[in-house]
Amino acid sequence: MAEEPSQLTDFNERFEDPSEDPLFDFDEEAPDRANIFARKELLKVGHVPESARIVGRDDEIKAVAAELRPIVQGDPPNNVMIYGKTGTGKSLVARHVTERARRAATSNDVAVGTVYVDCAQHNTQTRVARTVTRSLNETDATDFDIPRAGIGSGEYYDYLWEILDTAYESVIIILDEVDRLDDDDILMQLSRARESGKADCHLGVIAVSNKIEYRDRLNERVKSSLREEEFVFQPYDANQLRQIMKHRRDAFYDDVLSDDVIPLTAAIAAQEHGDARKAIEILRHAGELAERDNAETVTEEHVRDAQEWAQIDRFEELLRGSTTQVKFILYSLALLSEENPNSDGFSTSRIYGRYQETAEKIDATILSEHRVYELLKEQAFLGVVESTRTGGGRGQGSYLEHRLVQDTEIVLKSVLRDSRLEDLA
């Protein structure tokens, strides 16, 4: 049977004025267009709002500010380590206080630079050194053209020390998700730069981690060098979450949110250890679903549908920076979990068997069983997998069993979003 002519002929035509393309028509006055978002940036991950929108973190803001206060007068800041579960405002407070410190110092004619590094994405020493160096490079002052690739961490450091002494009196570097770094030497390099004579600039580090046990992993030399002040951020309670959501209400046009949307979103987040980031993500996704449906209001149903979408996004974010091999392993573990819903966990050898089948299916390199075991342990530290030691019965000894922390369906959908794994679907 011959195919029927496309009903979307107009969408395939060329337009002299690209703004007239109906595929991307954003006519706000169109009668059939739902206007949902007024200030969508308020719902973006990483957005740092003004002080009035920050809820329940006054004490934490003051405590972190006290450690950075010396730079305002040109003195060295203290290093800071901030711990807390996901969505407790750690990165928000670090970025908010750092920017206020920079502005205050500038008003006193103190040249202060700030850098934010996402260690989930920049998880090697070279990537961190490159990000810090390129971010701080003031070409008018240094005349440096720093390459994106082709040199190692040592050469980036050489550039960095000269940049610090040329353009700054103090610098604050935020290392977010510092536990994702595969090498702690970066902490040693930064915290000892002045002491070791590499730079005269005062350099402060704010390390942010979801893992309170992270410091136990550091070697004694790094701990001694950092000499940091530690803060633990507690989860938001239900009332604070509702206030946080209310302070994001003007991301939407008036009368767009139904009355039950904010209480429901806050309640969902409260069940997830007071995760404000998750609440904001759900609210944004709910608005996008309403926009897609061309609905006039965001409803409870949109929030319910957005909840799974946000979970997939969150897990995908957790895997950012992970290798394809890690995703093969998690995909294999998810399949085993799906096929054996009553099982409490799976041995490394059983996961390895399924992993081999997965890798062979798309002709990928197959790692050794020992390497797969090491990667499973890394994922356990990151909170993706839970590993417990169990007895194997008489004569079998004990061994580790691994299980996914997240729902199997969420893991499968997240992993298969990676274009490199599409053939597994």
Image (cartoon, rainbow, N blue to C red):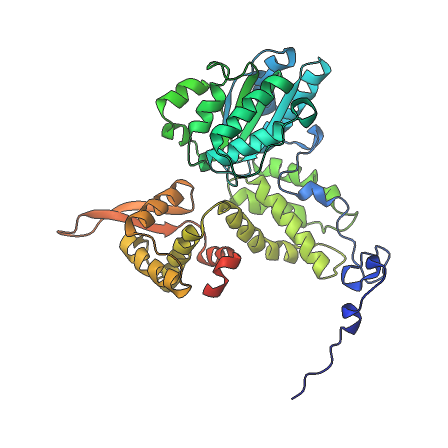
In this rendering, the answer to whether 106 lies above or below 20 is: above
Task: Specify whether residue 311 is in view.
Answer: yes
In the picture as drawn, the residue positioned furthest to the left comes out as: 395
In this rendering, the answer to whether 200 lies above or below 417 is: above
| Camera-nearest residue between 54 and 105 | 105
Q: Is residue 30 left or right of residue 264?
A: right
In this rendering, the answer to whether 137 lies above or below 344 is: above
Tell me the residue at 55%/55% (across/down): 308
Q: Position of residue 5 (x, y in %)?
A: 74, 81
Q: Position of residue 154 (x, y in %)?
A: 47, 28
In this rendering, the answer to whether 94 lies above or below 7 is: above
| Camera-nearest residue between 12 and 144 | 144
Tell me the residue at 54%/33% (across/down): 130
- Quadrant of the rendering where the N terminus is positioned: bottom right
In the picture as drawn, the residue positioned furthest to the bottom comes out as: 1
Counting every numbered tag in the picture gives: 0
* Quadrant in the picture for residue 29: bottom right
* Quadrant in the picture for residue 221: top left
* Quadrant in the picture for residue 12: bottom right
| Camera-nearest residue between 221 and 412 | 221
| Camera-nearest residue between 47 and 324 | 324
Q: Position of residue 205 (x, y in %)?
A: 53, 23
Q: Is residue 27 left or right of residue 216?
A: right
Q: Position of residue 196 (x, y in %)?
A: 46, 15
Tell me the residue at 58%/28% (across/down): 94
Task: Specify whether residue 425 is in view.
Answer: no
